[in-house]
Amino acid sequence: MEHALTCNNLKCRRELSERALVTTCSHIFCIECAQRLGVNGQEADRRNTCPACHSQLTNPDDAVITNLSPSEDYKTSVLSGLSPNVIMECAGRALSFWAYQTTQDIYYQQYLYKTLADKYSNLSVRLEKTVNDANSEIEGLHHKLSSLAAEQDALRRKNDEISRAYKDKSRKVLQLQELYDKVKRKAELGQIQRAASDAVDSTLQTNQMDSGYEVNLPTQIHAEIVPPPAFSQSHRIDISGMNTGLSRNYTNMTREGNHWPRLGGSSHREHLHFTNIRYLLTYDRRYIRSPCWWPPSIWHQHNIRTSNDDIANSRRNPDS
């Protein structure tokens, strides 16, 4: 396959097959480029320079349009009548033109190949760098994913441990709450019992104050006073039958008139004896519960029987 000539305009590079404009500087252009560049003018003053090498085209035969596919008749007549020397000279110049065009086309192809090779090398380097960066990033992401998976497992185990600890703490809290409720109920019962005992004490004190019974005791004696009940506002005690008379609940106690029975003289007044429940009569005429028995020289004693309920409460709760 023969090498096809191309337009020497670098912006065109069209393949020439039929007609073209040939210059004496060994360049060839397509008809469109020759008309656009003004190379095919018949007058010399209207011609421009060669678009490829900028040679001046002053002679009329410096740029001519030739037929690249001549007919057989044209081939027969174009060189007819010329001497062999002229024919050989024309053929030699035509071969030189063809060799120049082929060489220029080879140079162009080499430059194009070099340019494309450089671009390919640059693209290959960039591609390799991109691939390496991508592989490095993928490897880093794999390591990060592995660490995150391990961290997730650790957090899951920690969460399970916390959940088990929370359940254990909740169970202990429930147990403590139940124990607290039991203790609270027990304390409330104790306070109720203390309130009942205080009501009995108040009844005894009120009855004695009404009967005019007075006993003077030393102020140096220290007795344990029962603290007021913590639940006195919420737990009420029905004492409607406690201060209506001593003969109903205290069967062993008697009164003569409006006074307590006296054992005779000031010496007997100092011996007030409590048999079944321990009460102390202070200097300000108040009865308080005593934690122990005191000598007769300090406290006046008298034989007083408490009610059955108070005796039962005292035996069940000796600390109250």
Image: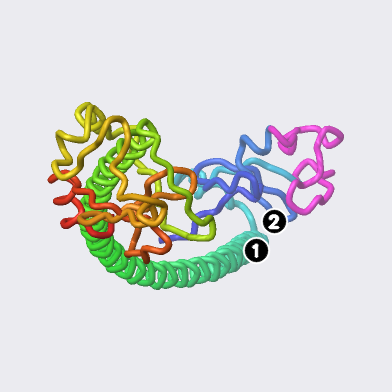
- Image disc number at residue 100: 1
x%, y% of residue 148? 37, 66
Amino acid identity at mark 1: Tyr
Pick the quarter of the image with the C terminus: bottom left
- Image disc number at residue 109: none
Residue depicted at x 51% and y 56% = 218
231 to 275, vertically: above or below: above
Q: Residue furthest right?
A: 45
74 to 42, vertically: above or below: below
Residue depicted at x 65% and y 50% = 10
Residue depicted at x 77% and y 54% = 53
Element marked by disc 2: loop
Residue sitting nearer the eye, 244 or 186: 244
Q: Name the main secondary structure of what is drawn in magenta.
A: loop
- Residue contact at pointers 1 and 2, CB within 8 angstroms: yes
Residue sitting nearer the eye, 30 or 81: 30
Residue sitting nearer the eye, 69 or 14: 14
x%, y% of residue 2? 45, 60
- Image disc number at residue 26: 2
Pick the quarter of the image with the N terminus: bottom left
Is residue 187 a member of the stretch shown in magenta? no
Amino acid identity at mark 2: Ser
For this view, does 96 lie left or right of residue 166?
A: right
Element marked by disc 1: helix
Crowdedness of circle 1 by 10 Å Cα count: few (<14), some, many (20+)? Answer: some
Is residue 56 a member of the stretch shown in magenta? yes
The part of the chain drawn in magenta is 36-61
Residue depicted at x 37% and y 70% = 142
Q: How is the image coloured?
A: rainbow
Q: Residue furthest front?
A: 265
